[in-house]
Image (cartoon, grey):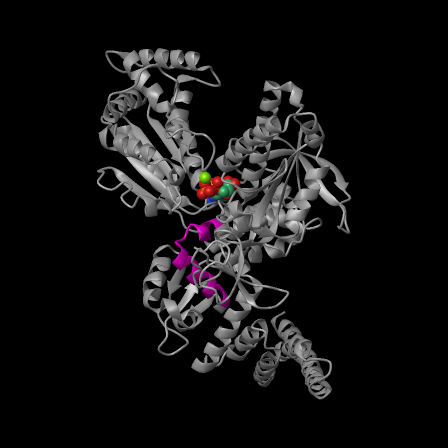
Amino acid sequence: MGVLTRQCPATLHRMVRCTACGEENSERARFCQACGTPLEASSGTRQERRVVSVLFVDLVGFTSKSEQLDPEDVRSFLTVYYERARAEIERFGGRVEKFIGDAVMAVFGAPVAFGDDPERAVRAAMAVRDSIADMDRADPLLELRVRAAVNTGEAIVELSARPDAGVAMVAGDVVNTASRLQSNAPINEVLVGEETYASTRTVIEYRPIEPIAAKGKTDPVRAWVAVAPLVEAGERVFSEVPLVGRDEELANLRSLWDMVSSEHRCSLVTVFGPAGIGKSRLAHELAHRATEMGGLAIRGRSAGYGDAGPYSAFAQHVAQIAGIDGDDPAAALEKLRTKAAALTVADDPNEVANAVAILAGFPVEGGAADREGLYFSARLFVEAVARVQPTMLVFEDIHFADPSLLDLVEFLASRVQDVPLLLVATSRPELLTSRASWGGGLLASSTISLGPLDEDDAVELTGKLFEQRGLDELKDRAASLAGSSDGNPLFIEELTASLAERSTRNASQLPGSIRGIVAARLDALPAPERTVVLDASVVGKVFWRGALERLRPDRDQELAGLLGSLERRDFIRREGSSQIKGDQQFTFKHGLIREVAYLTLPREERRRCHEVTAQYLEEVRLPAGDADATLAYHWREGGDPSNAVRYLLAAAEVAGRGWAKARAASLYTQALELVPETDEELRRTIVKKQAVATVAAFHVRDVERDRRREQAATDG
Ligand SMILES: Nc1ncnc2c1ncn2[C@@H]1O[C@H](COP(=O)(O)OP(=O)(O)O)[C@@H](O)[C@H]1O
Ligand SMILES: [Mg+2]
């Protein structure tokens, strides 16, 4: 159904584009004039500003090669090539935007971000390259060579665009630069741009190359060649900073471990928290403790992408227990059988080993009659392991896990008996949306919910990271950096890293990695809730229900439910009292969520929301305080400078009367920036007031300094 409206620049008429075929129709059309699909009235934001990673792959010299080939052969080859490329790209969560001749363009991070989209794009690029190398080996006459590139940056994205209809989905310099990088890539290599490099260099090894002088670019484009992944897909390298805070959480986990190992019990604990909050780190600290005490701690994880089988995390446990590492299937099964026999898992260890091998996805002859039987064997195996020494199995990132793995973990947690076994799962809160019953009905199941680091801990962590990176001269900025991190240790690391490299990149910009992770959190929200967050982001850190109603009158009915749902998900909080009488007041719990939501809105939508907010706040008469400055801000961003000036002057008067002279001077300066050169009279008046306020501000400062000196003299 066609629902896409956009501004047509040439005529400024609103055009409705059919999402079925891409045809532009007049705003009044109800059916597409080309294909007859009904066109729906547009609703809500259809365009967003998003950080995307764009991948280009192109075959080298294939055009000239194809001259010598039969057209049917060219066609059938290209079909295979497209299919392979598409399969690899989709395996990593990307989306093919178009095939142009023998080039492929794909996008990661839109329409949905996963939070690690640049890494996925680079891995996908390497995978496409490798699969073409396979095709080349199969048919060396084709002489298949590729050039590939990935570039990351902000783009405008049409969310309901259909790439298969040939409709451009993303637009922006990031696309052009990706294409330039691609044409400059060394043969059979993947070249990446600066932002891609910055977001992935801890997980992918790179080799720098000379900056590329690209057509249409003033400065040469910096570029790196991707050499190889440094870690498994989706893994993160821990920083080497000592653990900060988390005393209580760690103490709880330790006493759980002590209980499990001394009383020979089985228990399941799930650590919940958003990305980067420190779940893996906490599990790691506990594992350290467990092994110190003679226990066995083994980690397995579910990845958000790639080829992993449904029980992949369990398969990783099994492999580590049986000492399997890159063995071929036959050798792996043999090792597993030997281990099962050594553990005397049951009367027939081979039977158990076979069942476990089936679960782990080893290619084994024959199958199992039912799932219960397989799970029972897994239980016997795990019990035998834990009988030898207290065991802790970590299941990382179970929000990515296949439901079957969740079933297996719950099965083990409910059936394993009389052995010391601690099952530790880590998960983002999203799990409870898809599996609300997780851990329910189990006798020995508990959860730990990891919140932000408290302020002191955040500042301490920042200080330690500064020290590590030799940023001691910036010490006084530690508190403010910690403050803008929302208490998320990963964000603190990323902000510090970006500060350390400020010479090459814009330090005031939110690091792309953080924007990606927060965008993924937003994208995990149901669409109506997400729209509320986007709207509220314009109103401010503090916002009111009334303003949201005004912004989108059509959702009046659901608003209470949506706000409740967002509060439950820990995005916002309703405050006990409200500055606006008779209206409900809310705040964003995390400044970064608001910031990223705001960045997502296209300019025109942002402007409209500011304008509506300004009108609303004017009507309800936000009580004194910063009301004038707030209104000035919304009018300015809402595209009404003269109203903005009016409020800036009012705010300056108030500040001046309260002897906040420096603030008054700054408000006059802001006002001046908005008054057109032609309005000489108003400019003169403001300049005069600004001068008076500035002089007074100096005076205030001098008086204050003298007062402090006198104070020091009397104290001393
Ligand atoms: N309490 C903490 N003290 C110091 N560093 C921490 C702490 N918690 C997490 N980190 C660091 O922050 C980064 C992200 O933590 P991680 O455990 O990977 O997050 P999660 O698994 O929740 O996504 C890691 O480098 C980790 O070492
Ligand atoms: Mg983790």
Instruction: Where is residue 364? Give x, y as percent.
Output: 36, 16
Q: Quadrant of residue 335?
A: top left
The correct choice, above or below, for 456 with respect to 336 in the image is below
The correct choice, above or below, for 637 with respect to 589 in the image is below
Q: Quadrant of residue 587?
A: bottom left
Which residue appears at 61% of the width and 56% of the height? 477
Q: Which residues are magenta?
A: 520-538
537 magenta-colored: yes
Front-lying residue, 205 or 692: 205
Front-lying residue, 657 or 569: 569
- Residue 471 visible in the current orientation: no
Instruction: Where is residue 532? Give x, y as percent.
Output: 42, 62
Task: Count all numbered tags in the image, as a single digit.
Answer: 0
532 magenta-colored: yes
Which residue appears at 64% of the width and 26% of the height? 70
Q: Quadrant of ligand 2?
A: top left
- Residue 675 visible in the current orientation: yes
Instruction: Where is residue 414? Give x, y as percent.
Output: 23, 32
What's the magenta bit mostly, secondary-structure-wise?
Answer: helix
Instruction: Where is residue 661? Give x, y as percent.
Output: 63, 80
Question: Which quarter of the rendered picture does the C terminus lie within?
Answer: bottom right
Question: Which quarter of the rendered picture does the N terminus lie within?
Answer: bottom left
